Image (cartoon, rainbow, N blue to C red):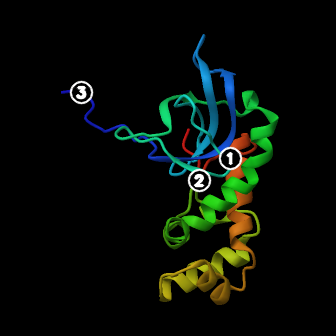
Amino acid sequence: MGNTQLRKYEEHAYVLDHKSRGKSTTVRGRTGVIVIALGEERLTLLEILGAEDSTFDVGERVYIGKEGRTKVQSVLGKMDYGKTPESAKNEILNVVELIVTTNEKKFVDYINNAQPLTPRVHALELIPGIGKTYMNVIIKERENEKFQSYDDIEKRTGLKELIKHLTKRIVEEITGDVRMNLFVKR
């Protein structure tokens, strides 16, 4: 019977950089409109082959799903952070913040459902700005009532700038500066 688990693919990605006449770093010999993007769901760096004569803006959300692509010919593959052009690296922080802001429900759900990773480390503690004190307040508050929004979390816990803290954590995971990933899928 084999493995029946469906492979998850990104539906949308956010443009970090593009070259109208570039060379792929993931597929040898492939040239064309090369787009470096960040997947919306799995937060992985991707190299994409854009449709000929299409234009892309940094921060633009593009459809990369299987059916009905308009601006994208194909997803060439995952990019290694070390091979990512500096121009794309410089946009990661802003694009991640845009994703965290736009996908509020996903990240609030994460805060509502985060669990201990080991007997000594809770997933919430790995988010910058959340230490043991804030972690305990968050857990106590969410047991009373699940959080509804970033504002709700900030008001009920006293934690400030949650979007910035989540963004910082995701950027650390993208750059490979952490041992354990909470948000970025390998």
Q: Is residue 99 visible?
A: yes
Q: Looking at the image, tell me whether mark 1 or mark 3 is earlier in sequence order.
A: 3
Q: Residue at x 69, y 60 (%)?
A: 97
Q: Residue at x 68, y 63 (%)?
A: 166
Is the C terminus in the top left, top right, bottom left or bottom right quadrant?
Answer: top right
Q: CA distance from mark 2 to mark 1?
A: 8 Å
Please, what is the three-letter code of the amino acid marked with disc 3? Gly
| Residue occupied by mark 2 | 182
Please, what is the three-letter code of the amino acid marked with disc 2? Leu
- Picture quadrant where residue 31 is located: top right
The disc label shown at residue 173, or none: 1
The disc label shown at residue 2, or none: 3
Q: Residue at x 31, y 39 (%)?
A: 6
- Picture quadrant where residue 83 is located: top right
Q: Are marks 2 and 1 in contact (CB under 8 Å)?
A: yes
Residue 129 in the image: x percent, y percent?
Answer: 76, 69
Please, what is the three-letter code of the amino acid marked with disc 1? Glu
